[in-house]
Image (cartoon, grey):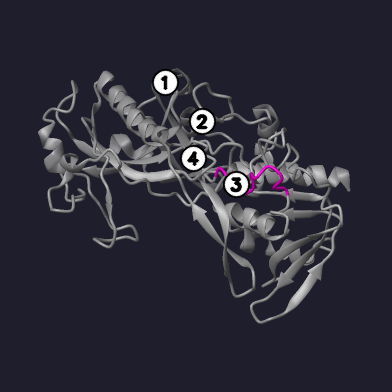
């Protein structure tokens, strides 16, 4: 994910992976995870099921779900601290600088009830998320925003595409795919929830010039009643039957919806902007222009084809790419029902979002390529820093939490040395 990859207009992190990886153990501790291991072999020792696929095309990874709610876990520690003052309901609405524009002198704060305050500090860190970080920077200066000398603040907004875009029929029974469900295991006296997923092998991404792809399998039993249906009624069981015998191992015994989580290509036209409207605090509202590229869709289609090829090559089953669309308002769930009928597949299939906001204040050693430097300091300023996934140089395909916590731990250590 951090490599410079040929064929992509913008790729790679200037921060070496070895430097980032040094901080994953600290992030693991903060997040209350039991291990910094994410490979199937490690988790098999703790009772997690074997991978369906793990070869030179498609690998299985294991992700952990953190049990930690930061507000619950760390509130008492913050209240006891003599070094930290927490202001609740205090909304940062602007940054004020000295005459040079390089040093932040004050943070303007307002409450919805009309209260106002000014916070003065030697160092300011924005940790407000992938939309609010660029919004505050853009709103804080009449000269086009702080750190925006090269018109990069708010650009390169990335998400993780998330959608059900296929189904697999597999000759093995549902219990053989148990690792792809969420499972709870006991590790060193601690209950840990983990789940397996399929990802494209690194060499495949390099060779094919593709963006990252992760596939989570929502497994159902073909012999039971827990089989999802299309909008008009036919079930995956009916579609699976069309494929006949699933593989050399025998007829289809399981079906799994393929829930895709995909990396987005960096695109300067995908960006956060300010509107002329103001909110209840008097701050200009943000507008998001989320743009996609042809490579975004092509990578998903090609990636699913590779997963299907791996299933077939191993004699495990078949994968049908439906590239279906969401039908808002129909059926259960906030996104409506999913059309999984291959007959209605379209090349402009819907790209849903995964609620991961990234890259809007991206990290780069060169100020013409990013908003913050490798220490997460805003280019052109002396005391303003940014934390969070808005600083990611590229989005990668993994969920961002452990990496943004690792970067925050690294920034904390840097500030400790500086101060």
Observer-side mark, 3 or 1, equals: 3
Region in magenta: 147-156
Looking at the image, tell me whether mark 2 or mark 1 is earlier in sequence order. Answer: 2
Task: Where is residue 207? Give x, y as percent.
Answer: 44, 17
Secondary-structure class at tag 4: strand
Dominant SS of magenta comes to loop
Looking at the image, tell me whether mark 3 or mark 4 is earlier in sequence order. Answer: 4
Magenta span contains residue 67? no
Residue beneath the point at 48% across and 32% down: 45
Q: Give whichever of 48, 25 is nearer the camera.
A: 25
Q: Which residue is mark 4?
A: 63
Q: Which residue is mark 1?
A: 208
Q: Which mark is residue 42?
A: 2
Residue beneath the point at 32% across and 32% down: 301
Looking at the image, tell me whether mark 1 or mark 4 is earlier in sequence order. Answer: 4
Looking at the image, tell me whether mark 3 or mark 1 is earlier in sequence order. Answer: 1
The crowding category of the residue bearing disc 2, from other C-alpha atoms within 10 Å (few below 14, some 14 to 19, many at least 20), is few
Residue beneath the point at 54% across and 23% down: 5
């Amino acid at each position: 994910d951090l490599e410079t990859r040929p064929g992509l207009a913008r790729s790679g992190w200037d921060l070496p992976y070895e430097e980032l990886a040094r901080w994953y153990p600290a992030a693991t501790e903060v997040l209350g995870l039991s291990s910094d291991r994410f490979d199937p072999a490690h988790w098999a020792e703790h009772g997690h099921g074997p991978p369906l696929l793990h070869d030179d095309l498609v690998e299985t990874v294991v992700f952990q779900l953190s049990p930690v709610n930061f507000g619950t876990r760390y509130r008492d520690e913050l209240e006891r601290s003599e070094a930290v003052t927490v202001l609740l309901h205090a909304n940062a609405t602007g940054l004020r600088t000295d005459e040079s524009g390089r040093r932040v002198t004050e943070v303007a704060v307002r409450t919805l009830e009309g209260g106002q305050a000014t916070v003065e500090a030697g160092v300011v860190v924005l940790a407000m998320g992938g939309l609010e970080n660029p919004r505050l920077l853009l709103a804080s200066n009449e000269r086009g925003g702080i750190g925006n000398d090269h018109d990069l603040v708010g650009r390169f907004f990335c998400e993780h595409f998330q959608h059900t875009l296929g189904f697999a029929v597999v000759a093995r029974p549902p219990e053989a795919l148990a690792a792809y469900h969420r499972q709870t295991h006991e590790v060193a006296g601690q209950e840990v929830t983990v789940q397996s997923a399929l990802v494209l092998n690194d060499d495949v991404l390099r060779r094919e010039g593709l963006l990252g792809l992760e596939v989570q399998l929502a497994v159902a039993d073909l012999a039971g009643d827990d089989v999802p249906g299309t909008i008009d009624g036919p079930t995956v069981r009916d579609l699976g039957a069309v494929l006949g015998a699933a593989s050399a191992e025998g007829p289809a015994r399981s079906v799994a919806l393929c829930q895709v989580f995909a990396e987005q290509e960096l695109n300067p036209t995908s960006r956060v902007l300010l509107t002329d409207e103001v909110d209840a605090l008097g701050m200009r509202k943000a507008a998001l222009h989320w743009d996609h590229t042809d490579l975004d869709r092509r990578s998903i289609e090609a990636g699913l084809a590779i997963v299907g090829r791996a299933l077939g090559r191993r004699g495990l089953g078949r994968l049908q790419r439906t590239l279906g669309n969401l039908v808002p308002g129909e059926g259960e769930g906030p996104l409506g029902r999913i059309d999984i009928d291959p007959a209605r597949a379209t090349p402009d299939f819907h790209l849903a979002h995964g609620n991961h906001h990234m890259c809007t204040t991206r990290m780069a050693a060169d100020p013409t390529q990013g908003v913050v430097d490798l220490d997460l300091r805003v280019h052109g300023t002396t005391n303003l820093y940014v934390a969070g996934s808005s600083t990611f140089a590229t989005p990668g395909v993994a969920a961002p939490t452990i990496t943004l916590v690792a970067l925050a731990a690294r920034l904390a250590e840097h500030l400790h040395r500086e101060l």
